[in-house]
Amino acid sequence: MNALTDITGHCLCGAVNLSAQVKNHDVDACHCSMCRRWTSGPLLVISVDGAIRFEGVENIGVYKSSEWGWRAFCKICGTSLYWHMSGTDHYAVSAGMLDDPSKLVFTTEIFVDEKPAYYAFANDTKKMTGEEVVAAFAAADNEGKGQNV
Ligand SMILES: [Zn+2]
Ligand SMILES: [Zn+2]
């Protein structure tokens, strides 16, 4: 049984607040070129599979960055809020938004094949190429909705 725990967070200016439930506190870093262009660094996220409750929805802008998903941001301060996989209830929420980062565990780095040479994390993480990530998402899709990868 997976016990769900609550997370809360907000953007830099406070115009967008969110709350959601998570299965774990694992953090993934994405090194892909889109995430790096979006945030000026790797995107560090926590997975939410299910509904996210927002306050300040009118301040959220969304941008379809690829056939895979949408990126949301605060229209006022520009904080990167989440990546949402098209056609699913899977959200990768910016770990930096969380009010309490104390439980977060940095576990995985994805799109390591797109990571530029000028930085590297010292954390001991699982590393996946873009190809491996796409394969894992496809496998999870075959097992049915709500499966995490
Ligand atoms: Zn904001
Ligand atoms: Zn990425």
Image (tube, rainbow, N blue to C red):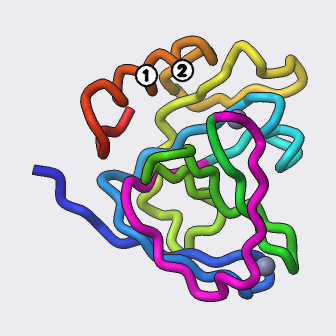
Q: Does the magenta stretch include residue 47?
A: yes
Under mark 1, the amino acid is Ala
Q: Position of residue 40 (x, y in %)?
A: 88, 45
Q: In which quarter of the image is residue 75?
A: bottom right
Magenta segment boundaries in residue numbering: 45-67
Q: Where is residue 115 in the image (x, y as percent from the top left)?
A: 78, 21
Q: Which of 44 and 20 is in front in this view?
A: 20
Q: Name the residue at 56% across, 69% down.
A: 98
**Dot 1 lies on which element?**
helix
In space, the residues marked 1 and 2 are separated at their CA atoms by: 6 Å
Q: Which residue is drawn at 43% across and 45% down?
A: 26
Q: Is mark 1 within 8 Å of ligand 2?
A: no
Q: Where is residue 24 in the image (x, y as percent from the top left)?
A: 33, 51
Q: Along the horizontal axis of the image, is 116 left or right of 68?
A: right
Q: Which mark is residue 134?
A: 2
Q: Relative to the observer, which residue lies in front, 28 or 103? A: 28
For this view, does 102 lie left or right of residue 29?
left
- In the depicted structure, whether residue 100 falls above or below residue 58: above
Please name the residue that numbered disc 1 is placed on: 138
Distance from mark 2 CB to nearest ligand 2 atom below 8 Å: no
